Amino acid sequence: MTKREEELTAAGWEKRFLADEPRLSEMKETYESIGFDVLLEPLPEKEELAHCSESGCTACMDLDPEKYRTIYTRARGEVPDLL
C-alpha cells in the first residue's frame, strides 16, 4: 500500500478499482447516485508501486497514465474530509 493509500484509508475512503473513460465517469455517477462520496485519484508513481503487491502488469497504463484514475468511495458524511 502506498503512503497516499494509507492516508485515504485513514480518512475513511475505500479503494474500489482503476478505470479510464467512459467507465470512469459512469461509475462516478453511479456511486454518487447511490449515496457515496467519490474521489478520483491519479495513478501512483511507478517507483511507488515497485514495492507494492499490486505492481503487476502496467504496460497499458505506462503508455498514458494521465487517462487512468483510481476510484475511492465512502458513505457521505461518514468521516470529515482530511484531504
Image: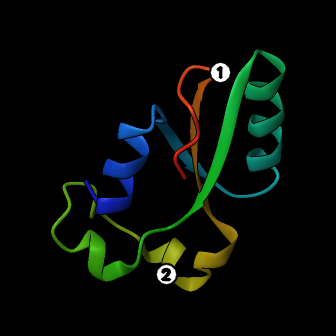
Question: The residue tagged with tag 1: helix, strand or loop?
Answer: loop
Q: Is residue 11 left or right of residue 40?
A: left
Looking at the image, which is closer to me, 53 or 31?
31
Q: In the rendered image of this protein, does residue 1 appear above or below residue 48?
A: above
Q: Nearer the viewer, mark 1 or mark 2?
A: 1
Q: Residues within 10 Å of mark 2 (few under 14, many from 20)?
A: few
Residue 63: where, in percent of width, then height? 56, 84
Would residue 7 appear left or right of 49 to someone viewing this image? right
Q: Position of residue 58 (x, y in %)?
A: 41, 70
Distance CA(mark 1)–CA(mark 2): 35 Å
What numbered label is drawn on residue 77?
A: 1
Q: Amino acid at mark 1?
A: Gly
Picture coordinates of residue 79, whole percent (x, y): 53, 27
Q: Amino acid at mark 2?
A: Asp
For the point 52% across and 42% down, the residue is: 17
Q: Residue at x 44, y 76 (%)?
A: 59
Picture quarter containing residue 54?
A: bottom left
Q: Earlier in the sequence, mark 1 or mark 2?
A: 2
User: Which x, y percent locates residue 19?
Assistant: 63, 52
